[in-house]
Structure formats: structure tokens, C-alpha cells
Image: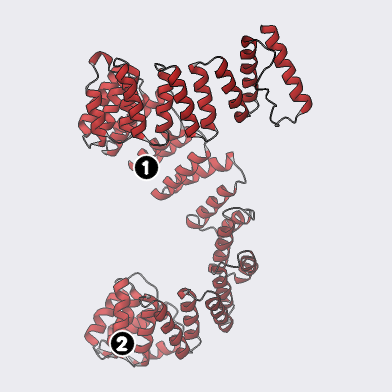
Amino acid sequence: MQKIACAILAALALSVAACAPKKAAVSVDPSAKGLSQGAATDYYFLLYQELSRKGQPREAALVLEKLIELAPSPDLYRDLANLYWGLGDPEKTREVLAEGLKKFPDEKILHFYQANSYLLQRRFDEAIAILKNYLATHPKDQTTSQELGAVYMEAGRFQETLDFLAQVPREKRTPAMAYYEAKALAGLNKRKQAMDKLHQALREDPNLLAAWSELAYLHEQAGELRQAEEAYRRIMDLGEDGPEVWTRLIRLAIKEKNEAKAIEFLEKAPADRTFLFEVMGMFVDAGYQQGAAKVLERLAQDQPGNPDVLFLQAMIAVDKEKNLEKAFTLLSQIPKGHKYYDKSLTTRIQLALDAGQPERAWPLIREGRETYPDRIEFWFFEAIYHDKKGDLAKSAEVYREAAAKWPGSTEALYRYGVALERMKNREESLKVMERILTLEPGNPDALNFVGYALAEDGRDLDRALDLVSKALLTSPENPYYIDSLAWVHFKRGDLKKAWAEIQRAVAKPMEDPAIWEHYGDIAKAMGNRKDAAKGYSRALEMGASNAGEIKGKLDRLK
């Protein structure tokens, strides 16, 4: 019989090699005509194995069904169920298992597979019903009791978990059951009892990894960092030293504010890419520059030229090292089509503009406009470029075009309005800002702009006060809004309120000569020459654009 089976397999292999491409489906003869039942059984089994090996699960399932007709067994039903599950057909999977259970009603593995098919879809009621049904006819089965306790716990039915496991006789209890009870108690916020159960489970089985993991987690949650670290180290002693454990140890060290220890753990951990990126985020969030640099070193060693790594290195160069050239070089290496390419482009443009290098930014801006025609920020960058080059009219025109292309963009309108104001075209500027308030009545920048402009013109001061007050509701500590409020009060002749607000404005962290000039004007109006001189002097120190006018005010105080 073995010789016949081998000959069949050899012939099959030859026919496959000669007649079909490597990935092609193998022709299946469902009848196996001319063979005895035993030979047909061997034929189908070998054919099933061959099809499985070649990655043809659907054809393998058809052969396995014929094999089950000839020689049914629990293992074959299990294998067929696995094939249909892998093919994404859970209903067919359960149909196969149900058929198997009709023939083998006491076969535990089939009950477990059927329960697991529901559990994987989080259909807990069905999974529980199957296990309870089996347990009803096999009440002393320890494995099923343990599995049912696990399903109750996984379903979040914590009290039911405890009630069910409490019924299990002492001699049938396992360390895993104590662990499930601990998880249920933790879910019910009974931490002390949960810890007691975990210690019980670990006395019975010191190598129970799940219990050590839960113990570590509960200690960490309670801020007991030393005990949590000991538990995680115990997990590693048991041979579980994957990235997750190292991540938790590093997180503990960061919680302890011990960067050196976190780096020590990092250097011992495996160079897993996902792990390293996660740890990078942890170091950055904690403000640990040295730790972040260490992660980058490892990433760069293991994956030189990786665009993700290049982008992170560039961000470190910008934020921590303040190294424009290094950041620019790194970002330039990120290829087109990469998920970070647009960010590399916008970052390089911003770096060049901030560094006063508009010519360096210009080709990148043009590239951005062409590559991402629907991204408004590249229009803004172009307007800023023209502004930096001293062509305010061209800058305003680009903002106007952007506002026309994106009619719902209040930011484009606001930028256009500010550009018009800077061109001394206040009436047109106010029309643009009023349009913003029509589109978005609560826009704080537009409210403040219109309120301040009305005050500057000395008209409609009641409305000016109302608008600025509304802006301050959205941002009560904004020094520019506070300055506007002070200026409105000043124009209304309420010097006491104006002085109180302007003092509040200059107390905020800001570097704006116009606010200090207002400080000087209000102090002067109150007869406070010393503070007036202080305000004008600070405005001059900050490089006010109207330095000649302010110097004249300062001279007239003498």
C-alpha cells in the first residue's frame, strides 16, 4: 500500500511540474476511480498535503471533504475547519465543526474550536454556551472549567467569572484559574484581593508569565515602580524578553525621572524598529534629548537612509540643536512619494524663510505649488516669500488669489486683510475683516482687528469695545487683545482702565514695540513721565519701525 501511495504522489508531482505553472491550481480527481478504499484514503491524504504545501487551501478543502467521507476523524474535521477559517468563511467553519460534533459528540477539541470561532469574533454568549454544554456532560473536566473562566473574564463579566470559578472543587483548581480570578477582581477595582490572588497563583506556579505581567501592571498602576520593575525583570528571567517588556521597563524609568536607567534598558533591548519608534516618542515626550539621540543612533545604524529616521533626525536638529544646515540636508534626502515628503518640503521652506533666506525657499515653494496644487499653505509660503523680498503688493495679491480659490478660508482672508492694512489701505482691509465676521462671527482675530482699527480711527468706539471684549472671551490672556482693549479705553478717554489693561498687556511674554509705545502714550496722558519714557525706550530697543516718531515723543518728555 505504501508503494502505491508513493507512486501516486510521484506521478502527481510530475504532472504538476510538467503541466502547470508553480502557482497554478492542481487538478483534483474527486472520485479516485479504480482504487480501493484504503488506497483512496492514502491518495486523498497525500493530495491534501501537497495542495496545502503549495498554498492552495480551497482545493485542499475539497480534497479533505472527500477524505472525511471515506475516513472521518476529529483531526480531519479540525483541519478542514482551519482551512475554511483561513479562507475567511466562519459560517462554513462552524458548519464543519457542527458536523464533526454529530459524529464525535464527546470530542473536546472540536467543542473548543467551535467556541474559539465565536470568541475570535467576540461573540461571547455563543462561546460560553458551547463550553457550558460540554461541561454539563463532563462536569469534572478541568481544562474546560479553566477555559470557561477565561472566556467569562475576556467578556468583561467579572462577577460571573468569580462566581463560576468559586464552584470549581479545590482539587480541580489550577494556577491559571487563580490568575483569572485576579483579573476579574482587578476589573472590579478590588486591587488588594487581586494582588492576593496573583501571589497565590505564583506560589502554585512561579513560572506563570501572565500572572507576573498582571502583577507588574497593578504595581505600575499604583505607582509602586520598584515592585513593578522587579516583576518585569522576573518576566525577563523566564525568557520573555520581547520589545513589550523592554518598553514597560523604559516607561518605568522615565516615570522615575531616571533618564540614565531608561538609556541603559534601551541599550540592552533588541533593535526592533516599531519598538525604537515607540521609545523615541516616550523620550521626546519626556524631554529627554540624550535618550532620543540614542534611539536615533540605533535607528540610523540599523536602517541607514530610512526616510522615517531622517525625518526624526531633522526634527531633533531643528528643535534641540538649532542646526538649520543639518536639518536642511537631512530633509533633502527624503524621497518624493514618501509619506513625509510634504512635511520635509514645508519644513525646509519654513526654515529658509525664518533664517532670512527667501531665495533658498523659492524653488521649494514652486515645487510645492506644482506637486500639491490643493494645499493652501504653499500659497501662503509664496506670499511670505514676496513679503520677505519687500514686494508687499505682490504678497497681498497672492493672498487675494488664495482667498478666491478657497472662499471658505477665513485664514486666507485674514492674511489678505492684514496685508492691505500694511499697505495703508485701511478701508479695504476693514471690508475684508467684516467679510470674515459675516462668515465666522466669532473669529477672534477679526474681532480684535476691527475693534482696534475703529479705535485707531476714533470712531464707533462702543462697537470697538464690544468687538475687542468678545475677542478676549476666547483668549483672555492674549497680550495683543489686551493691548487693543487698553487702546479702546484710551480712545474713549477712560485713562484709569486703559492704564490697568496696558500694564496687564506688557506683563505677558511678548516682544512687540507697538504695545510698549501704547504703554508710553497712556502713561504720558496720565502725566506719568517716568513710565512714558520707559515705554518709548523699550519700543526703540525692540526695533520699532516708526523709530523716528517714537524718538520724537521721548525727546519731548525732557
Q: Residue at x 35, y 18 (%)?
A: 143
Tell me: residue 138, above or below residue 113. above
**Mark 2, residues whose alpha carbon is within 10 Å: few (<14), some, or many (≥20)?**
some
Q: Residue at x 76, y 20 (%)?
A: 14
Q: Could you say which quadrant of the image residue 39 lies in?
A: top right
How far from the left and from the top, in percent, is residue 71? 55, 14
Give 12 or 321, whichever is nearer the viewer.
12
Q: Which residue is mark 2?
A: 463
Q: Which residue is mark 1?
A: 254
For numbered disc 1, what is the local secondary structure? Answer: helix
Q: Nearer the viewer, mark 1 or mark 2?
A: 2
- Of the 4 image quadrants, the one containing the N terminus is top right
The three-letter amino acid code for the residue at tag 2 is Arg
| C-alpha distance separating marks 1 and 2 | 53 Å
Q: Is residue 49 left or right of residue 19?
A: left
How far from the left and from the top, in percent, is residue 128? 33, 29
